[in-house]
Image: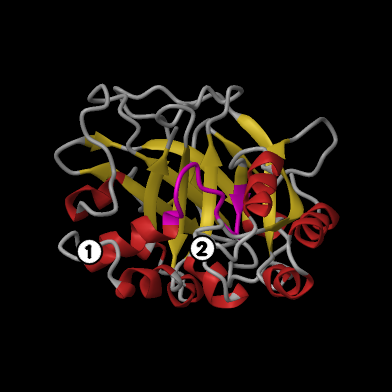
Amino acid sequence: MTSQTSLHDLARTHLPADMAARWLTLLRPGAGLAKAEPGEPLAGRLGGAPELPEGEEWPVWEGQGPLAFVARVDCAALPVHVLDIPLPADGTLSFFYFDGQIDDGEAFVAPDEPETWAGARVIYAPAGAKVTERPTPAGLEAYPEVPLTARLEPTAPDIWHPVVERTVGVDPRGEGWPSAFTDALYDHSAGPGHRVGGHADPVQNPVEFEVAHGVLGKDVRWDDPRVAEEAERWVLLAQFDTDDDADMMWGDCGALYWLIRPQDLAERRFDRAMCTMQCC
């Protein structure tokens, strides 16, 4: 996890003072999720068996099969009063993904393929809702259960996110951008990790671009200004990294990302969340 001090130090060491000041305004709080040690407060878990509200069926991708249960997050155990996205103050979020167990990886979820969007789901159970533990469907093997604890952490946008150039006033691809700062950020990163809120930590390029392009349609060129504009309308809901303890491997040591528009999050429209996977 990244400390506030270290990100400030990186910016002030490698950027001119005015650029550093503008870049530091982009830092956002996130809830980093890590394996809980004995005695640490629990904020959720990877794997195991999900608890779903009564009447809620196990999510299925029609024509493909049931989705695998990835993780559950307890909203009341997160620092929701500090995070800058309108998360529920209580209740649980359960994340499901079609992980290839059923079809040996033939089908996969892609933001620019609307027919695949059913391969990822977020299910919200409000506090007080009656829930029951569900057995894993035939053909799927549950991931080993790993308890998670939450720690508040500062997060920085990917250097290629459109908000960086718009805020700092310098194109990271141009001559006016200190490449040493880009190198220092990448050297400093420990990888995506598990997180709720904050900026996404992509394995490759900004995940917001992938979602934006998918929403606008594959006929829209990637360099169309509308893609960058749409990318800024999405925020990270959660990301889940490859995890040895949970026996989770997303692609080649990749991560899963769920993004959502803030208005949809405020209205609890988790059916409108979008998922993408990136790997090395």
Give the mark nearer the N terminus: 2 vs 1.
Answer: 2
Residue 240 horizontal side relative to residue 215, left or right? right
Helix, strand or loop at disc 2?
loop
Mark 2 Cα shell of 10 Å, populated few (<14), some (14-19), many (≥20): few
Residue at which label 1 appears: 221
Q: Nearer the viewer, mark 2 or mark 1?
A: 2
Residue 220's spot in the image, x, y percent?
20, 66
Q: Is residue 256 above or below residue 117?
A: above
Outermost residue, front direction?
A: 175
Would you say 130 lies left or right of 29 here? left
Scheme of image coloration: secondary structure
55 or 12, nearer to the observer: 12
Where does label 2 land, which residue? 174
Tell me if residue 146 is in the magenta stretch.
no
Please tell me how crowded label 1 is: few (under 14), some (14-19), or many (20+) other residues with Cα within 10 Å. few
Q: Where 114 sits versus 105, above or below?
A: below
- Answer whether residue 200 is magenta in the image: yes
